[in-house]
Image (cartoon, rainbow, N blue to C red):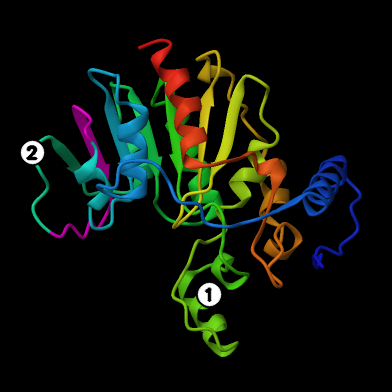
Amino acid sequence: MIHRVIRSPFTSEVNLRLRRLIDSFNLNLHRFVPLKSTLNAEGTEVSRFVNTVANNIRQYSYLEVGVHRGKTIEAIRANNRVAVDPKPLYLRRPSQGISTFKCTSDFYFENLQDGLFDFIYLDGLHHFRQTWKDLENATRAISEFGVILIDDVIPVDRFSAVIPQRSALTLRKKAGGKSGAWHGDVFKVLLMFSKLPDNFCFGTILFKQNPRAFLFARDGNWCTFPNFSLEEISEIDKVRVESVFGFNPERLIPREFNLFTPTEAQLLLSSHINAVS
């Protein structure tokens, strides 16, 4: 049974649309079973995926927001690699060809003067509003037929979606859980994606370790990315994780999040990128 937590009356048109959207998700859920990927076994899930998608591109650029220990960006085979993180925790000195900016993503995008990226991977602060702000900025920094990837879009349990991280871990521990998993409320980005015009294509890639989302413009026209109102963003921000996902007893994902295996997503994105490369 899916427990719906949103009980407040929906009076505005925005709230009514949101209620219908959530109801449709709850009626059409997919049981998440980690699938074995056929992609190359080197690097991380994301680096293997990007390298496979871009296999036939001679030169491409890659931006990663939130690099942590640098395992993903180190394994990316792009000609131009840019890392943005206020406090990167590299295990060793970054390889030649990686430009690291030790600053917030807001500061980086505000001061980005030229250059577009073919791949942008968003793995920064796992708060919906900041992730959405990073995404809006990324749509102005992505190349015409580039791809944006977003980490941690599917929480593993209701505690995983609590913000801040310390509260999530404390609540899980009190409930008897031992996991340190934390995804924040980034899942709300997928609710926003459901509102995008038809020229944008998004999906959720069911990686073995951690599902991630992708977004691209079918026609290459990123200028049509909507400027959502503060009211629309605020309404999505009110959504409770229990009203979208089922956690008892299985991990369930709404099919409306456009679910892909890694291989299916790789074929789709390779076709999109290689058509114009």
Q: Is residue 139 above or below residue 88?
A: above
Q: Residue at x 58, y 73 (%)?
A: 159
Circle 2 SS class? loop
Q: How many marks?
A: 2
Closer to us: 64 or 261: 261
Which percent across, then down, holds residue 25?
77, 49
Q: Is residue 38 above or below residue 61?
A: below
| Pointer 2 or 1: first along the chain | 2
Residue tagged 2: 96
Most prominent secondary structure in the magenta stretch?
Answer: loop
Q: Of discs 2 and 1, which sits in the foreground?
A: 2
Residue 90 counted in the magenta span: yes
Which percent across, then down, holds residue 164?
50, 69
Residue tagged 1: 168
Q: Residue at x 46, y 19 (%)?
A: 271
Quarter of the image with the C terminus is top left
Which percent across, then down, holds residue 268?
50, 26
Q: Is residue 167 above or below residue 111?
A: below
Query: Magenta part of the protein: which range?
Result: 77-91
Instruction: Farthest residue to the top: give it.
Output: 276
Q: Is residue 157 above or below residue 80?
A: below
Q: Tell whether 202 sits left or right of 121.
A: right
Residue 248 counted in the magenta span: no
Q: Badge 2: few (under 14), some or many (20 or more) residues near its Cα, within 10 Å?
A: few
